Structure formats: C-alpha cells, structure tokens
Amino acid sequence: MKVSVDRALCYGSAECAHRVPAVFAFEDGYGVVRPGREESADDPRLVEAAEKCPSQAIVLTE
C-alpha cells in the first residue's frame, strides 16, 4: 500500500509527524510524507496515524 497526505484537507496539526516521524514530516505548516517513504503503508502505525488524523488527510491506497 501507499501512503500520502491530502494537502487540501491537512490543517497542520502535526499529529502524523509526532506519531510516525520515520514516515511523516512537518513542512511549511503541513504534514508530508518523507521522500522515499510513500510505500510504507504496510506499517501498522500508519493505519493508526490515518485513523487519528484530526483532519482525515492521511490517505492509504492499494
């Protein structure tokens, strides 16, 4: 699976970067997926991060 952040939904809580800093970063006021980590969605912590994202901006796709 792939992970991404929908920037149109993200309002910059930085929750993702705090939960899974190896995959997410906080740049220019928004959560982003670190380069090269887009294929990290097999990590169970990402499912939790997506569920707990207050803006529901984390997208997990097949």
Image (cartoon, rainbow, N blue to C red):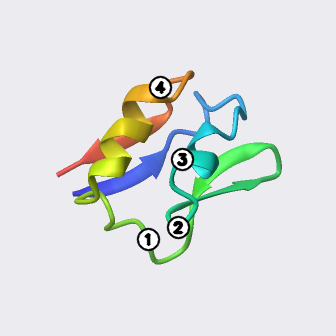
Residue at image mark 1:
37
- Image coords of residue 40 (percent x, y): 33, 65
Q: Would you call the spot at circle 1 few (<14 residues within 10 Å), some (14-19), or many (20 or more)?
A: some
**Residue at left offset 50%, top offset 63%:** 23
User: Disc 2 vs disc 3: Cβ atoms closer than 8 Å?
Assistant: no
CA–CA distance in space, label 2 to label 3:
9 Å
Residue at image mark 3:
19
Image position of 54 with respect to 20: above or below: above
Q: Nearer the viewer, residue 19 or 23?
A: 19
CA–CA distance in space, label 4 to label 3:
14 Å
Q: Which mark is first along the chain, 1 or 4?
A: 1
User: Disc 1 vs disc 2: Cβ atoms closer than 8 Å?
Assistant: yes
- Image coords of residue 21 (percent x, y): 58, 60
Circle 3: residue type: Arg
Residue at image mark 2:
22
In this picture, residue 21 sits left or right of residue 61 = right
Q: Nearer the viewer, residue 48 or 1?
A: 48
**Residue at left offset 46%, top offset 27%:** 52
Q: Quadrant of the N terminus?
A: bottom left
Quarter holding residue 55? top right
CA–CA distance in space, label 1 to label 2:
8 Å
CA–CA distance in space, label 4 to label 2:
19 Å
Circle 4: residue type: Gln
Q: Which mark is first along the chain, 2 or 4?
A: 2
Numbered badge on residue 56? 4
